Amino acid sequence: MTDCDVAVIGGGVIGVAAARALAERGARVVLLERGDVCSGASYGNAGWVSPSHGTPLPAPGVVRQALRWLFDPDSPFYVKPRADLELARWLLAFLRASTAARAAETMRLNRELIVASLREYEKLGAELGDDFGFAQRGLVVACESDEGLTKARHELEALRGLGGEGSVLTADELRAAVPSASPSLRGGVRFPEDAHLDPERLVRALARRAEALGARIETGQEVLALERVGRRIARVVATRGDFRADHVVLAAGAWSPAVAAGLGLRLPVQAAKGYSVTVRCSPGAVAEPVLLFEAKVAVTPLGDRLRFAGTLELAGLDLRVNARRVSAILRGVERFLPGASGSARLETWRGLRPLCPDDRPMIGRPRSVENLVIATGHGMSGISQGPATGRLVAELCSGARPSFPLEPFSPDRFA
């Protein structure tokens, strides 16, 4: 059996950010990943660090829209019909979180985490160099309807109430910012604080840095069980050896509930499948990230590549590619950016993002297990919130005072 200070379960952005932050504090860290580093949801996402993060999924207006979308396979938010008690409980908690007050609180909390991560990314840029393509060029929201433009302006006003910045764009100003935009677009909003990066390069750079600081990363190591004695985890049982750790960090993304279940913990996290299509393009074809508002598609420039990411599909731990979802993304791109999706396709990707019913992550210790720290449920904001979450995990494991109040992110909040 291998002894360590901290065993981190999960090799996505949350796990490697935690491993790096822990190793930086001098902890003996072992990270266990069932596949390869960055082989899950952290690989092919949009790569946004977005303090303009708008209205959370559960909100009064969003729920009305979502109810129209839920069972439409072509919609941006789709629930695959299935007999699943955990899904039913999750949807009920989603509805309970859909009040104006709770949505406003979640928007504030998520923004604070993202702003903290943005500061961490600036430090990482100095530490890692240009290893992960970080650029703070802002974000343009493009709207094709007057209704969409009105909603985008309302989100801007809500953001300003939290100290954020942004400006409304006329149709001409939108086309000046995004020359490839369709002439039919009505206008948009620009958020200057937002940044973007290459998510695969980021996670791999963080993993290399963690190893340079002394962390041990073991890939192909699936955690089979967490053996508990009283209120503590006594042993981590994995496919290629067992581990004894003072602290265990559960950052296994959409697989976290299955790992936690053996401890008697129920984590209301659903696997939210997202898709992306990456195409070849001329460098600078799109200068800054663009959100196609009504289509709910994120467009990210990655050097000589362009990535279109979107959709949210609750279908359980199902990694099959749904061609209708991919086609819906590409149709949205064609409406907003004619011709952009016709470039040479390099990759079609899907990944399972861990989504809590109130659209805020779980970060903290559950009351019933003293040496467990849970860090999951970041939904579509894993890249945006990763470095701040990693720092919070390191603070918890080292006994330091957390730099954020963690009660709103408590894993016990749904009990």
Image: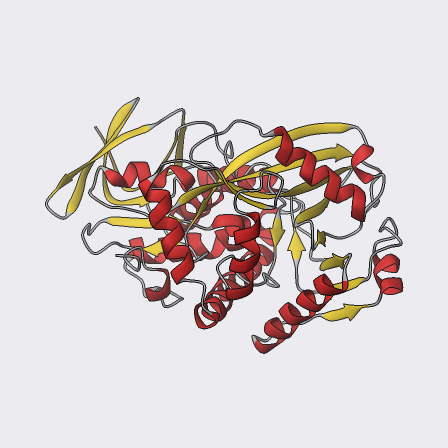
Position of 55 with respect to 412 (left or right) is right
Q: Tell me what residue is drawn at x 88 percent, y 59 percent.
A: 176
Where is residue 33? Give x, y as percent.
Answer: 40, 32
Nearer to us in this view, 158 or 117: 158
Quarter of the image where the N terminus is located: top left
Figure colour scheme: secondary structure
The answer, for residue 48, to whether it is visible in the render is yes
Identity of the residue furthest to the top in this view: 240
Quarter of the image where the C terminus is located: bottom left
Nearer to us in this view, 74 or 376: 74
The answer, for residue 29, to whether it is visible in the render is no
Where is residue 347? Give x, y as percent.
Answer: 67, 28
Q: Tell me what residue is drawn at x 44 percent, y 27 percent.
A: 35
Q: Quadrant of residue 201?
A: top right
Q: Is residue 286 above or below residue 111?
A: above
Position of 407 with respect to 302 (left or right) is left
